[in-house]
Amino acid sequence: MSKNSKVWRLLIGLLSLVFVLVVSQTATPAKAATHNGADFTTAASVTNGPDFKHADTIDIQYKLNFGDTPIHSGDTITLDFPENLKGKTPGDTFDVTDETGQVIGKAVVSDTGVVITMNDALEGKTNAKLTLNLATKYRYDDSGEKDVVFPLENNGSSTSQINIVENDANMSKKGVLQDDGTIKWTILVDRREIEMKNLEIKDTIGDNQELIKGVTVSNAHWNSNTSYTREKPAMTEGTDYNVTYTDNGFDLKFNNTVNNLVTIDYYTKITDPSLTHSGYKFRNNAVMTWGGGTSGGPNSEEANGKVSSSTGNSGSGGGDVNETDEEDPDEDTGTIDVDEGTETDEEEAAREEEEKEAEEKEEAAKEAAKAKKKTAAKKAAAAKAKAAAAKLAVSKATATQTPGTTTTLHHTNANTKLPQTKDANGNIASILGATVFLATLGSAVIRRHF
């Protein structure tokens, strides 16, 4: 074999290897990225208050702008709550949507922050923006004025000041939605643990509920400013208290003086199930009276409770379509006297009015064309997303809609690979085959020539 033949074979082999390596790199799907939300946060603050009791909800808002950073399907965005706040509903999931209502990501709330997993809705768009509204609570048991510090982009920060105040109420009330279409209501009686003689509770349920007869009354004690423990066994009806049921609630009277925390638990049934997950607020009212007698009238205090399927967490966002919104520059500007001064004032005014109308029509036509172009682009993007979704075989997924409520979706073909993975493997196989064929053919030609 000649020396030139060996050289040619070596060159073809090296070129084939380089070609295969380059193609394999470009054909490999991009790995999902994890973005630290603080690096893209342009503004963040507490949006209610400033005075909060320990159990109150503290609403916060984040605004993020990703600029030139692309957002791909599978990318995750993590945001940490300020150090002295905690998630109100850890485990809650919610959709992040764009201005049209299309879901662009799924968010999961934890005790310390939120993680958003994006889909392909922002693929190919620039200047992606997100606005997140989240419900939190104060993390500690102390009180007074506190700084809530949010980290921002470029190592900046934003500070909101809140005031944590002690709860001076002797009674409070809350409700929790249950999976079976009921609401568990809890009344905290004698929160400050003062002496209460002749203690009575009159409870009235709100609209779209009916009372389920049966109450559980328990002595309790505080563990912290926000948590308590019921003591067992519960109190005994007829001995410790008496209860009378009414058309829209109940009246409860204690037979002995109360000087410690007491809990009253009972249930109502939601009469219109369509309201359960609609965000409708179910309400309840309780009035407590105590004392009185020969020294004067009784003391009175009122507590209102409400509960809804809304957790206070939501997100919205979007991006810019890769197209230009620039208008064509006007070639003529200023006032032009087209008749060289031969028009009368009336004729000039009439002509200018006609020109103004023509310009307005032309401007309207431009705006209509731009709107049509944007609509077409959105429809094309939606059609592309729909077509891509139709090709995907989605595996079994579980999404938590509300705390304690889990919905499971079933699909087939759970082990099918994504189309882009198949295509990438197919493309590499085709290129490798072509490369081997070219190398073999080159070798044969060289052997014949020499």
Image (cartoon, helix red, strand yellow):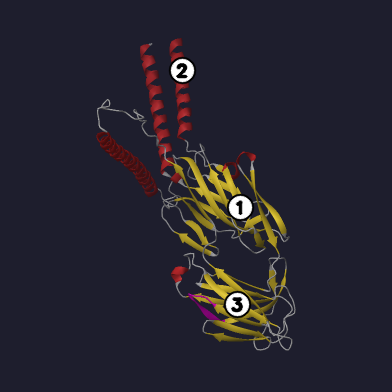
Q: Along the line of sight, which residue is nearer the eye, 143 or 337?
A: 337
Please check the rendered image and state whether residue 208 is part of the magenta-colored stretch, yes or no. yes
Q: Main secondary structure of the magenta part?
A: strand
Query: What is the secondary structure assignment of the residue under circle 2?
Result: helix
- Asked if residue 2 can be seen in this view, the reply is no
Q: Residue at x 58, y 46 (%)?
A: 43
Whether tag 1 and tag 2 are in contact, CB under 8 A, the answer is no
Q: Amino acid at mark 3?
A: Ala
Among numbered discs 1 and 2, the one appearing first in the sequence: 2
Q: Residue at x 61, y 61 (%)?
A: 57
Q: Amino acid at mark 1?
A: Gly
The residues bearing labels 2 and 3 have C-alpha atoms spaced at a distance of 89 Å
Magenta residues (range): 205-213
User: Mark 2 sits on what residue?
Assistant: 11
Query: What is the secondary structure assignment of the residue under circle 1?
Result: strand
The quadrant of the rendering that contains the N terminus is top left
Query: Residue 355: x, y in percent?
Result: 28, 36
Quarter where residue 252 is shown: bottom right
Among numbered discs 2 and 3, the one appearing first in the sequence: 2
Query: What is the secondary structure assignment of the residue under circle 3?
Result: strand
User: Mark 3 sits on what residue?
Assistant: 286
Whether tag 3 and tag 1 are in contact, CB under 8 A, the answer is no
Q: Look at the picture and state if 422 lies above or below 333.
A: below
Query: Residue 75: x, y in percent?
Result: 52, 44
Q: Along the line of sight, which residue is nearer the eye, 403 or 157?
A: 157
What label sits on residue 56 in the rendered view? none
What label sits on residue 113 in the rendered view? 1
Q: Along the line of sight, which residue is nearer the eye, 31 or 297?
A: 297
Whether tag 2 and tag 3 are in contact, CB under 8 A, the answer is no
Q: Amino acid at mark 2?
A: Leu
